[in-house]
Amino acid sequence: MRLPHLLVFAAPVLAALVASAPAPAVQTDDTAAFLSPDNWEGRKDIWTVSDGTIVGETKEDPKYNTFLCSKTKYADFELTCKVVLKGGVGNSGVQIRSERTDKDGDKQPYRVRGPQVDVGKGYWGSLYGEGVGGMMKASDPAKIKAAVKEDGVNTYYLMAKGHRITIKINGETMVDQDFPTLPGKDAKAAPAEGIIAFQAHSGYASMRVEYSDIKFKKLGK
């Protein structure tokens, strides 16, 4: 049995194969830049960004929908996070490819329009057109009932790639289709990029929403 001779022969062959193999793809982590407090602006009496967690809490009805807005615009991306809507009370959501509509000195600052991934009773996981014509795709009520913990922790997965928008809650697909246009009688092309923003909804004496364990990744064209 001449095993040593086989090993001597095999060693340079294996080394050559290893040398010629393609290098593994480098994974870039966009989460830190996304979650940097310097990337966000909103009402400081409502929003905090700390240690990778975003919290929105109102002590009284703000009388309008106000948002924590990213300063950076994003096109194609994936975002996962855990969401808790305290007591199941209130309404929030994640705006994608959106734009601010308030002006400097506005008495109702940090207002936004565009597609919104909804968080709240009856709307969990729906895609809503905030300020642009209303519902784009409502979640199936049966799926909401089966998947969502109204007063618990819910894991959201969002993907925007081209016209395709995918929304999952706790692994259940709520929305997965193309949206080339925004809703409304004057329908226009859906934006290819825009800000991301988190909502504190009006109409509630108080509410608290927490987004944690956030992971964000920009997708290539």
Image (tube, rainbow, N blue to C red):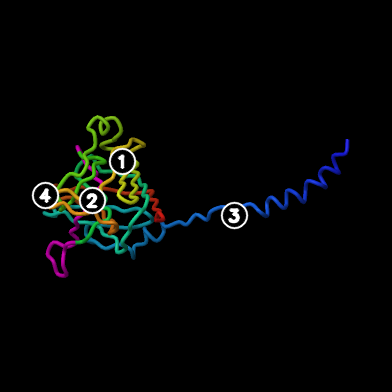
Q: What secondary structure is marked by label 3?
A: loop
Mark 3–mark 1 distance (CA, rounded to whole Å):
33 Å
Which amino acid type is shown beneath numbered disc 4?
Answer: Lys
Tally of numbered tags = 4
Circle nearer the viewer, 4 or 3? 4
Mark 3–mark 2 distance (CA, rounded to whole Å):
39 Å
Instruction: Tell me if label 4 and label 2 are in contact, CB under 8 Å.
Output: no
Circle number at residue 142:
none
Q: What residue is shown with label 1?
A: 176
Give whichever of discs 4 and 2 has the lower sequence position.
2
Q: What residue is shown with label 3?
A: 23
Residue 20 is left or right of residue 64, and the answer is right
Which amino acid type is shown beneath numbered disc 2?
Answer: Pro
The magenta segment: 101-122
Give whichever of discs 3 and 2 has the lower sequence position.
3
Q: Is residue 128 magenta?
A: no
Q: What secondary structure is marked by label 4?
A: loop
Q: Residue at x 19, y 56 (%)?
A: 113
Residue 85, image x, y percentages: 26, 43
Q: What secondary structure is marked by label 1?
A: strand
Mark 4–mark 3 distance (CA, rounded to whole Å):
51 Å
Give whichever of discs 4 and 3 has the lower sequence position.
3
Q: What residue is shown with label 4?
A: 185
Q: Is residue 64 above or below residue 89?
A: below
Circle nearer the viewer, 4 or 2? 4
Q: Residue at x 28, y 45 (%)?
A: 178
Q: Residue at x 35, y 54 (%)?
A: 76
| Callout 3 crowding tier (Cα within 10 Å): few <14, some 14–19, many ≥20 | few
Residue 77 is left or right of residue 202, and the answer is right
| Callout 1 crowding tier (Cα within 10 Å): few <14, some 14–19, many ≥20 | some
| Callout 4 crowding tier (Cα within 10 Å): few <14, some 14–19, many ≥20 | few
